[in-house]
Image (tube, grey):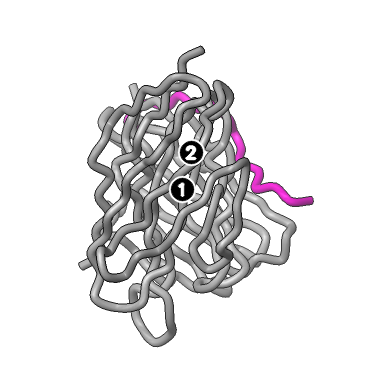
């Protein structure tokens, strides 16, 4: 399996809802990433995990809460989001933090109403 | 600070014409440079990395440290090359809190006309 799988593909949620985005890879990669991408803009880094520990938090608001329960899984818990948080959320993985390229999932298209 | 600049939002060429997508970077340490491509309705995919010095789908890119550039080139464009291309930079080396941080340029849309 050489893919990064993200679920769900689409998500619509209200500002008071709590939801989670899921990401899975079975390539044995030990670094995992969350990116946010707005329409016609480049991906912006949110979080980096290395060996299941949070390595980088790009000053992301606390309404986004990442979790890495094991080396294959990465979650992004969402709570009290704003309409401006609507975007494509991309998960990626790499063998390690350096010297290996990132592999991206197809993303979850999130709409906050 | 790391910064990647792609000066062209849109590059439009005819099939068979040469293509050069420009990428300049600013970074004080040792960078890793990548080109990623996003075809319509597909995931972001790695196209090239400077460490590999390979040619993928006819594309090449050479890291020029003197000019801090990593331009992407192809001698003869094909219609299937039409896509969004992102240049990206990552810190290379251990011992930094920013290790692993991959940042992207603004992207260039390549349009290859028949």
Q: Is residue B12 left or right of residue B38?
A: left
Residue B18 figure quarter: top left
Q: CA distance from mark 2 to mark 1?
A: 6 Å
Circle 1 packing at 10 Å, graded few (<14), some (14-19), many (20+), is: some
Q: Is residue A58 above or below residue A97?
A: above
Q: Is A6 covered by the magenta stretch?
A: yes
What x and y, as percent, mark residue A11? 50, 27
- Compared across the picture, whether A112 is left or right of B39 comes to left
A113 w.r.t. A102: above or below: above
Q: Establish if A107 lies above or below B30.
A: above
Percent across and percent down for residue B41 are 55, 25
Please give the label number shown on residue A77.
Answer: 1
Magenta run includes residue B10: no
For the record, the magenta segment spans A1-16
The residue singled out by tag 2 in the image is A19
Label located before the other in sequence (2 or 1): 2
In percent of width and height, residue A104 lies at 56, 47
Of residues B62 and A109, the one drawn nearer to the viewer in this rendering: B62
Host chain of mark 2: A
Q: Measuring 54% from the left and 72% from the top, which residue is drawn there? A: A99
Instruction: Report the front residue among A40 and B77.
Output: B77
Please state if B60 lies on the left or on the right of B20 as rendered.
right
Q: Are marks 2 and 1 in contact (CB under 8 Å)?
A: yes
Q: Are marks 2 and 1 on the same chain?
A: yes
């Amino acid at each position: 399996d050489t893919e990064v799988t993200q679920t769900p593909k689409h998500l619509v949620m209200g500002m008071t809802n709590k939801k989670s985005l899921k990401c899975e890879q079975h390539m044995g990669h030990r670094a995992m990433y969350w990116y946010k991408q707005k329409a016609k803009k480049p991906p912006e880094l949110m979080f980096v995990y290395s060996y299941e520990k949070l390595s980088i938090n790009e000053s992301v608001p606390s309404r986004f809460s990442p979790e890495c329960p094991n080396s294959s899984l990465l979650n992004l818990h969402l709570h009290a989001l704003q309409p401006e948080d609507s975007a494509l959320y991309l998960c990626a993985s790499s063998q390690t933090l350096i010297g290996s390229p990132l592999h991206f999932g197809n993303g979850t298209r999130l709409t906050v109403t | 600070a790391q910064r990647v600049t792609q000066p062209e939002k849109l590059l439009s060429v005819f099939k068979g014409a040469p293509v050069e997508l420009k990428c300049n970077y600013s970074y004080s340490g040792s960078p890793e440079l990548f080109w990623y491509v996003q075809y319509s309705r597909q995931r972001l995919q790695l196209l090239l990395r400077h460490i590999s010095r390979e040619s993928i789908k006819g594309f090449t890119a050479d890291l020029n440290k003197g000019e801090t550039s990593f331009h992407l080139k192809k001698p003869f464009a094909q219609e299937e090359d039409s896509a969004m291309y992102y240049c990206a930079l990552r810190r290379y080396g251990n011992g930094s809190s920013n290790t692993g941080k991959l940042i992207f340029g603004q992207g260039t849309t390549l349009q290859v006309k028949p």
